[in-house]
């Protein structure tokens, strides 16, 4: 069933990419629609004279065609906005001529956007390849992330001290990719906590995250062989208000004295408030967010910090799931390839060779 679902996702991805490069059907514009044309003063004068003589009907559907002979396959070939068909108040920008819209040939496949199609197909292929490779060889190399290695140490510290672990998944809802990544990490954290027989407290801000967090914690304990250790009351809805939530989390830190605070998700102005309270409570803290404007506060106040995209890599790093590992390695290799292409483009542009830049230019 997983293979069927993956195949359907791939087909849907290709179809979305295909329709992305389809051009607008300009030839199907209704007759009588008026346009503003960006043309030269000479052509504007000629147009006005033709209009005065009655050679151009007011309901004629027309568009701009550059004199350089470009094919009409994208919106850059002509620019139109709604004003009079007689061409009054026209701007003078580039050489062009007026043509009948009904005579314009429109391709079903916009070849000017073929670059997007090729890049996305190549990226999808790399992800599928590395997913297959991770299944055949589970021992795929992933760069060591000290902050994630410290999670087991922090949980062990909680077990020795007989104190709970506090996991804060950020303040954004489930439509945020950081929250989704945090939920995947939460499942793995719950599994380790179940193995260590410790308690886990998860304060939640958005209501829709509560059932997801409950299921992830429950599954983590189940995978650890300790389903009886799951306590639904430890997954707590605090408040939907940002700073009321921050105050609630601070209260948990000061009252229940968790020995480890894991702050992983999307954070904003409350990040420093929560992190500083954790320092006062004497907890070891591992934080991570992709919101770069909050990273300095986590770096200053926490023992370990996942910087930027490391929070997305954490799910693959902890679970070793072949699909997640394949997605991680595929995206990393795509970045390597694109970086090489950019460097090559800089060198070629320096020597006046423009073909690579033009090939990547999306009109």
Image (cartoon, rainbow, N blue to C red):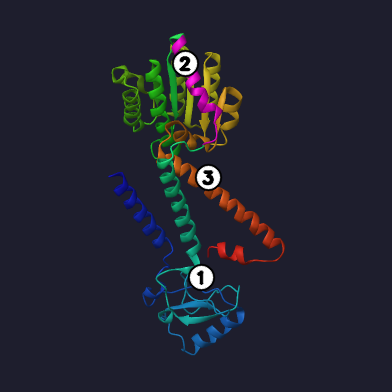
Q: Characterize the local packing of mark 1: few (<14), some (14-19) or many (20 or more) Cα atoms within 10 angstroms.
A: some
Mark toward the start of the polypeptide (2 vs 1): 1
- Magenta residue check for 344: no
Please indicate, yes or no, whether residue 81 appears anywhere in the rendered image. Answer: no
- Residue visible at 45% across and 57% down in the picture: 121
The location of residue 261, given as percent across then percent down, is 48, 20
Q: Characterize the local packing of mark 3: few (<14), some (14-19) or many (20 or more) Cα atoms within 10 angstroms.
A: some
Mark toward the start of the polypeptide (1 vs 3): 1
The location of residue 23, given as percent across then percent down, is 43, 68
Kindly indicate whether the residue at mark 3 contacts the one at mark 1 (C-beta within 8 angstroms). Answer: no
Span shown in magenta: 142-160
Q: Give the residue at mark 2.
A: 156
Q: CA distance from mark 2 to mark 3?
A: 32 Å
- Residue visible at 60% across and 75% down in the picture: 94
Q: CA distance from mark 1 to mark 3?
A: 39 Å
Q: Give the residue at mark 1.
A: 79
The location of residue 20, given as percent across then percent down, is 42, 61
- Residue visible at 50% across and 46% down in the picture: 331
Q: Looking at the image, which residue sits at the far right?
A: 351
Mark toward the start of the polypeptide (2 vs 3): 2
Q: Between residues 30 and 211, which one lies in front from this camera angle? A: 211
| Label drawn at residue 266 | none
Q: Characterize the local packing of mark 2: few (<14), some (14-19) or many (20 or more) Cα atoms within 10 angstroms.
A: many
In what element is the residue under mark 3? helix
Q: Looking at the image, which residue sits at the far top?
A: 161
Check the image and report above or below for 149 versus 358: above
The location of residue 145, given as percent across then percent down, is 54, 31
Residue 359 vs residue 318: left or right? right
Q: CA distance from mark 2 to mark 1?
A: 65 Å
| Label drawn at residue 332 | 3
Q: Quadrant of residue 227?
A: top left
């Amino acid at each position: 069933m997983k293979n069927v679902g993956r195949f359907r996702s791939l087909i849907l991805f290709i179809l979305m990419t295909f329709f992305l490069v389809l051009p607008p059907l300009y030839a199907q514009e209704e007759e009588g629609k008026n346009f503003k044309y960006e043309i030269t003063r000479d052509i504007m004068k000629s147009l006005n004279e033709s209009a005065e003589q009655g050679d151009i009907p007011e309901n004629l559907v027309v568009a701009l065609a550059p004199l350089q002979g470009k094919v009409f396959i994208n919106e850059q070939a002509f620019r139109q906005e709604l004003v009079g068909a007689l061409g009054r108040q026209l701007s003078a920008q580039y050489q062009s001529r007026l043509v009948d819209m009904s005579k314009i040939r429109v391709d079903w496949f916009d070849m000017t956007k073929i670059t997007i199609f090729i890049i996305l197909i190549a990226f999808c292929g790399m992800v599928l390849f590395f997913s297959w490779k991770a299944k055949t060889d589970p021992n795929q190399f992933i760069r060591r992330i000290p902050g994630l290695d410290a999670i087991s140490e922090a949980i062990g510290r909680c077990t020795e001290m007989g104190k709970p672990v506090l996991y804060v998944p950020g303040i954004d809802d489930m439509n945020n990719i950081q929250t989704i990544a945090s939920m995947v990490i939460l499942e793995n954290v719950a599994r380790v906590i179940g193995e260590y027989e410790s308690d886990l407290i998860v304060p939640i801000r958005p209501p829709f995250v509560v059932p997801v967090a409950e299921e992830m914690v429950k599954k983590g304990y189940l995978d650890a062989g300790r389903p009886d250790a799951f306590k639904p009351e430890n997954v707590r809805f605090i408040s939907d208000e940002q700073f009321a939530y921050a105050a609630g989390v601070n209260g948990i830190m000061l009252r229940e004295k968790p020995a480890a605070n894991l702050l992983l998700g999307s954070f904003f102005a409350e990040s420093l408030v929560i992190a500083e309270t954790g320092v006062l409570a004497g907890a070891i803290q591992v934080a991570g967010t992709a919101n770069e404007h909050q990273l300095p506060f986590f770096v200053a106040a926490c023992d370990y910090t996942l910087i930027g995209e490391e929070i997305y890599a954490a799910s693959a790093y902890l679970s070793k799931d072949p699909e997640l590992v394949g997605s991680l390695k595929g995206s990393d290799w795509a970045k390597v390839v694109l970086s090489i292409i950019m460097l090559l483009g800089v060198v070629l542009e320096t020597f006046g060779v423009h073909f690579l830049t033009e090939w990547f230019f999306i009109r």
